[in-house]
Image: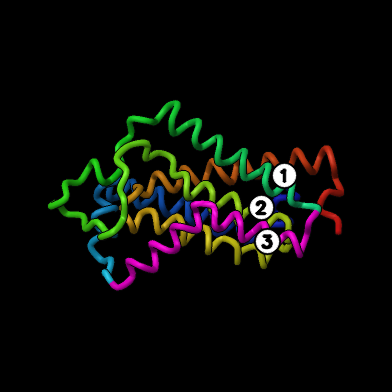
Amino acid sequence: MRVLFQRTGGFLILWLVFLLLGTVLISLYGKTGFHILVNRYQPETTDTIFIWITRLGEGWGLAAGFIFLLFYHRKSLLFYFSSWAFSVLTVQFFKKGFFSNIPRPASVFAEDGPVRFVEGVSYRHWESFPSGHTADAFSVCFALALIMGNTYRSSWWFFPAFLIAFSRVYLSQHFLQDVLAGSLVSVLCTSLCFLMWHKWKPGFLNT
């Protein structure tokens, strides 16, 4: 476990703060109450920005990471894709196998209710928990942080993952608890995958 903090201490600290703060906010306001609160202060001028940000969690972020590693660190590509696949498949297993009846904001709130839905966005109504886009984003960014292996600079990789996660709440595709769970599953799966690679092939990140 020490090797994880040695390589990604900055990322993990920010992520733990995100988890803790998110849990506190849900405890104080409830999942629907917090969602209404955040939605109330969303300016329409930023809608297009977050529509594009959320698309990074649909495979574009994974592709960008692949191109980066193709030139920077080809030896890590197998770990990169295996950790992503492990994370995303685990989230889908829970989403479809155990939580398929969990409603999304579009099911909870009526169109003329307290939540403003973004024009032009196609909304899904079920399988809200956990967030697949968030899992995709955190898996890619955490894997890249592990590959880079700089505990301080690893914090840089947290912010794109956080923005993609927040975009899911901003667009009312998910509640905060959904993105927290998606990040949790993803970070745990990526960590487990890294530790397995580190044990079985210790030099897999050596250049």
Q: CA distance from mark 1 to mark 3?
A: 20 Å
Asked whether residue 64 is drawn in magenta, I would say yes
Instruction: Name the residue at 78% across, 59% down.
Output: 73
Secondary structure type for disc 1: helix
Q: Answer few, some or many: residues within 10 Å of disc 2's Cα (few below 14, many 20 plus, some between 14 and 19).
A: many
The front one of 13 and 129 is: 129
Q: Which residue is mark 1?
A: 194
Q: Answer few, some or many: residues within 10 Å of disc 3's Cα (few below 14, many 20 plus, some between 14 and 19).
A: some
Q: Amino acid under label 2?
A: Ala
| Percent coordinates x, y for residue 37 in the rendering | 25, 58
Instruction: Name the residue at 33% across, 46% down.
Output: 27
Q: Amino acid under label 3?
A: Ile
Taking the image as shown, residue 70 lies to the left or right of residue 15, namely right
Q: CA distance from mark 2 to mark 1?
A: 8 Å
* Quadrant in which the N terminus is drawn: top right
Q: Which residue is mark 3?
A: 67
Question: Tags 1 and 3 in contact by the CB under 8 Å rule?
Answer: no
Query: Residue extending furthest top?
Result: 97
Which of marks 2 and 3 precedes in the sequence?
3
Secondary structure type for disc 3: helix
Taking the image as shown, residue 195 lies to the left or right of residue 114, namely right
Q: Which residue is mark 2?
A: 143
